[in-house]
Amino acid sequence: MTASLTMFNIDAPRWDQSTFMGRLKHFFNITDPRTLLVSEHELDRAKALVQSCRAGMVPPGTSQEQLFYAKKLYDSAFHPDSGEKMNLIGRMSFQVPGGMAITGFMLQFYRTVPAVVFWQWVNQSFNAIVNYTNRNAASPISVKQIGIAYVTATSTALATAVGLNLYTKRAPSLVARWVPFAAVAAANCVNIPLMRQQELINGITVTDENDNRLGESRRAAVKGITQVVISRVTMAAPGMILLPIIMEKLEKYPFMKKIQVLHAPLQIILVGGFLVFMVPFACALFPQRSSIALSHLEPDLRVSVVAQHGDKVPHVYFNKGL
């Protein structure tokens, strides 16, 4: 068994990434919140095992399942481009516990302006950490640019939330409950492109199907960032749209009026139920290794690729980020 594992390709996807179901299984695997409980030492051991396998030196007695588990830990905690360990809050496996707490409080405390301001600020701070952690590592961003992205996204969220909160004072209560989602969606449309602005300015690395570098493309960056924005909004949508409807109906019952102190914990738990499925679902909407047709690239890059490879490269590939 061990001898055969020396030829085991640990970077080959366990599930077919060209299909949605294959990607869904993959992201259920690496967004598993239980990986947050794994010690730093075990994460480092997993990385060492992955690197050993890549070098064709699998330790004697290692099983295939151990390699799969090591790769799961590696994918959950280490950046796919740089190989550096990501901060815990920024990992996609933290989206369920982190997102359920923040979203639950946003949905519960939506009536007063101070509460709206505070929880939108907390949410945008969390999003900024996640976006920075999952950026394309080949496109560094300065502290100043990070600050501008954070302030702009937070301001957008606050302006949207506070503005709509005041505008919906006379609207049905359900409409007011949907204000946090509108603010989150608006902020995502600003936060992610600004946090990854270097990719839009300088482009991101595109390769052929064998990972040979072909150049930098801004159009590929636009496609990747657009997909990430759609994924993030989709991730939040069911919980922030359906849960207010559920709570609106539940709060009409007498027993719910008697346990108002438990409304926030209840919403946190329900949001968690949505996110357990929506985090991997949203991440799986688009392939991690995205592609773009050669004909859609910038003219100068297209000419360069054709000059070097002729018509052998109809599509180029890039990491879209998360």
Image (tube, rainbow, N blue to C red):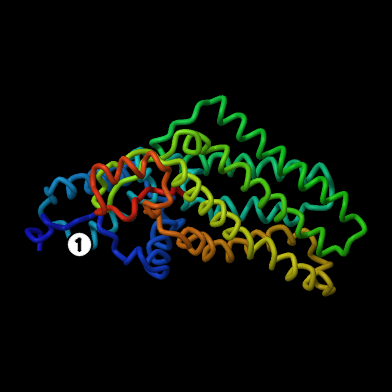
Q: Is residue 244 left or right of residue 35?
A: right
* Camera-nearest residue between 214 and 42: 214
| Residue occupying the point 65% across, 45% down | 123
Horizontal and vertical percent position of residue 153? 66, 39
* Camera-nearest residue between 316 and 113: 316
Q: Secondary structure at mark 1?
A: helix
Q: How many marks?
A: 1
Quadrant containing the N terminus is bottom left
| Residue occupying the point 68% across, 63% down | 266
Q: Quadrant of residue 126?
A: top right
Horizontal and vertical percent position of residue 23? 39, 64
Q: Is residue 35 left or right of residue 235?
A: left
Horizontal and vertical percent position of residue 149? 60, 34
Tell me if residue 93 comes above or below residue 281 in the rendering: above
Horizontal and vertical percent position of residue 5? 13, 58
* Camera-nearest residue between 133 and 187: 187
Q: Amino acid at mark 1?
A: Gln
Q: Is residue 44 left or right of residue 161?
A: left
| Residue occupying the point 16% across, 56% down | 62
Tell me if residue 240 comes above or below residue 159 in the rendering: below
The residue carrying mark 1 is 64
Callout 1 crowding tier (Cα within 10 Å): few <14, some 14–19, many ≥20: some
Tell me if residue 39 comes above or below residue 261 in the rendering: above
